[in-house]
Image (cartoon, helix red, strand yellow):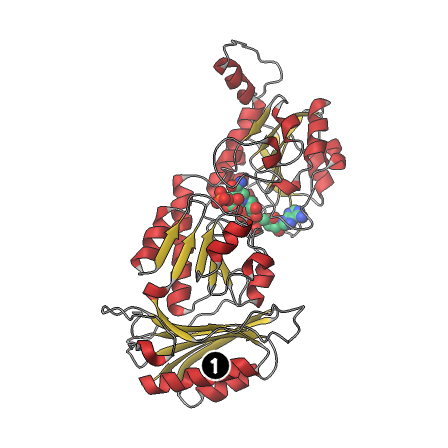
């Protein structure tokens, strides 16, 4: 169905001659309603858009697989290798419909408030702690990530680090670079027969468990939920038990309130004399001052850090304060491997992430499908065998309150509803319906009614319509 540009006054949309998905969107909440709880975003005008109107901002050198995929859909893609902060980020995000980021770009509530057109966020990584997920949901903004495409890369890095720490390779390599030949076996050991303690037995932790056992290590793990152990690994009851028994402790937990300073003075003291610590999860999980002291006293034999309390937004020389307090001291200590957050930075992982998150964004924009979303109910409908221009998909995102669906269905009820699905996640509800046999005038009337409803109800977050005939 071709939606003419004059269907809504004020639209700049030019419908391309080759058919492409065409949609409407409308976002906003009633400013007066529970302003403290739900964001008061100014009401936006309902306007038609087609793929050529969709503006996508990709930051942090998101892989070219994603860029190509999104460009192929006809979206306008702006690409940057670095992350942005504060005013620069706010300026960049103001008009875009989609933003793609990795772990560095902080999308806080105050940044999101400036993103008036934002429909979706793609986190081209595993972690989503850099985004205020709850606030995004309250703004009707759907967030996607890649839950496991870089797990193997992180697990391989950790195995390498276990061996490097056991053989003090970081220091020996540095000595050679600076002209010293120092051949010694003192404080060097094999990893065979040693105990690897994994904290967080999710995608990365469990993958690492397999690799470590195949190298002859014994694996213990601690997780807040009971999990099936792989191979001969064994789940321990608490963190203390793991710390006391392990030769190498490695962290693979998400950033949460509970994992902040997970390893501090008491935990380091509980670790075995001469053991090593590896952190490739998030910088805030280890108290660096405590680590410095544990290393200086000789209680710990080594450490590997891939993540830091703060991280620079661009590549190049860094100052200690760019990474957080105690980094200067850590840089001077022996047998500490420092890497610039490269756990997931491999060709394989980045290509897979680009395809996965890029694909999820295309499915969301073109079909409203939220499968894989981390802050929205996961909703989709089966593909129509032969959709034509009379098929329209309507998406209505609203607060999960009694009566809203009835009001939406009162409007849809005037049409032939082929399929419908709605689901909720906490306070957010997501309704998707496919209607058929609608002509252009009816689409116009339907959207007028939905717009009037969205102005009247305090529970409205976002709605859009997709012409299924064109998106196939
Ligand atoms: N260095 C890197 O480049 C890199 C790459 C990928 C992921 N990461 C980080 O690693 C984290 C883990 O990744 P994943 O894919 O294995 O995640 P995951 O969600 O699959 O697994 C995390 C596990 O940690 C457990 N957990 C949560 N809180 C815990 C706690 N307080 N104590 C013990 N266990 C706890 C969970 O139950 C879960 O089993 C990510 O959240 C991300 O921050 C870093
Ligand atoms: O969360 C992740 O996947 C990792 O921390 C990797 O983040 P990056 O894509 O910024 O390297």
Asked if residue 307 can be seen in this view, the reply is yes
Asked if residue 123 can be seen in this view, the reply is no
Q: Disc 1 on helix, strand or loop?
A: helix
- Please provide percent x and percent y for residue 75: 34, 60
**In the picture provided, is 324 more to the left or to the right than 174?**
right
Vertical order, 185 against 132 (above or below): above
Q: Is mark 1 within 8 Å of ligand 2?
A: no
The 10 Å Cα crowd at callout 1, few under 14, some 14 to 19, many 20 or more, is some
Vertical order, 142 against 398 (above or below): above
- Between 132 and 78, which is closer to the camera in this rendering? 78
Q: Quadrant of the N terminus?
A: bottom left
- Between 386 and 202, which is closer to the camera in this rendering? 386
Q: Residue furthest bottom?
A: 414
Q: Residue at x 29, y 68 (%)?
A: 20
Q: Quadrant of the C terminus?
A: bottom left
- Please provide percent x and percent y for residue 190: 56, 22
Q: Residue at x 26, y 68 (%)?
A: 16
- Between 353 and 104, which is closer to the camera in this rendering? 104
Q: Residue at x 68, y 43 (%)?
A: 236
Residue identified by numbered label 1: 451
Vertical order, 286 against 103 (above or below): above
- Please provide percent x and percent y for residue 370: 46, 65
């Amino acid at each position: 169905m071709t939606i003419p540009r004059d269907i809504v006054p004020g639209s700049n949309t030019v419908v391309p001659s080759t058919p492409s998905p065409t949609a409407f969107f409308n976002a906003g909440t009633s400013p007066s309603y529970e302003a403290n709880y739900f964001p008061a975003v100014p009401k936006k005008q309902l306007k038609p858009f087609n793929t050529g109107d969709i503006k996508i901002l990709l930051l942090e050198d998101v892989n070219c697989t994603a860029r190509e995929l999104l460009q192929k859909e006809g979206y306008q893609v702006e690409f940057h290798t670095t992350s942005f902060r504060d005013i620069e980020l706010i300026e960049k995000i103001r008009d875009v419909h989609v933003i793609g980021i990795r772990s560095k770009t902080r999308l806080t509530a105050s940044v999101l408030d400036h993103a008036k057109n934002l429909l979706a966020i793609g986190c081209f990584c595993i972690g989503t702690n850099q985004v205020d997920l709850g606030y995004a949901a309250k703004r009707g903004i759907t967030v996607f990530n890649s839950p496991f495409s870089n797990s193997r890369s992180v697990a391989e890095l950790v195995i390498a680090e276990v061996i490097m720490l056991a053989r003090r390779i970081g220091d020996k390599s540095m000595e050679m670079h600076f002209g010293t030949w120092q051949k010694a076996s003192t404080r060097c050991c094999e990893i065979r027969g040693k105990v690897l303690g994994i904290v967080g037995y999710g995608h990365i932790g469990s993958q690492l468990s397999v690799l470590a056992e195949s190298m002859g290590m014994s694996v213990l793990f601690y997780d807040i939920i009971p999990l099936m152990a792989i191979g001969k690994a064994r789940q321990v009851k608490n963190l203390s038990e793991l710390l006391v028994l392990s030769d190498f402790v490695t962290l693979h937990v998400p950033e949460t309130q509970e994992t902040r300073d997970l390893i501090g003075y008491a935990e380091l003291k509980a670790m075995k004399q001469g053991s090593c610590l590896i952190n490739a999860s998030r910088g805030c999980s280890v108290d660096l001052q405590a680590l410095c002291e544990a290393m200086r006293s000789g209680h710990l034999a080594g450490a590997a850090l891939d993540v830091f309390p703060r991280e620079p937004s661009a590549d190049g020389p860094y100052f200690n304060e760019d990474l957080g307090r105690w980094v200067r001291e850590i840089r001077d200590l022996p047998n500490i491997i420092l890497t610039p957050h490269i756990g997931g930075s491999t060709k394989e992982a980045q290509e897979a992430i680009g395809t996965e998150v890029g694909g999820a964004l295309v499915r969301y924009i073109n079909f409203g499908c939220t499968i894989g979303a981390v802050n929205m109910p996961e909703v989709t409908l089966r593909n129509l065998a032969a959709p034509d221009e009379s098929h329209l998909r309507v998406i209505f995102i609203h607060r999960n309150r009694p009566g809203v669906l009835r009001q939406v269905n009162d409007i849809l009820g005037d049409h032939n509803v082929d399929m419908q699905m709605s689901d909720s996640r906490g306070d957010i509800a997501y309704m998707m319906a496919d209607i058929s046999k609608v002509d252009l005038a009816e689409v116009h009337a339907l959207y007028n009614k939905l717009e009037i409803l969205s102005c009247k109800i305090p529970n409205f977050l976002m709605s859009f319509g997709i012409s299924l005939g064109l998106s196939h």
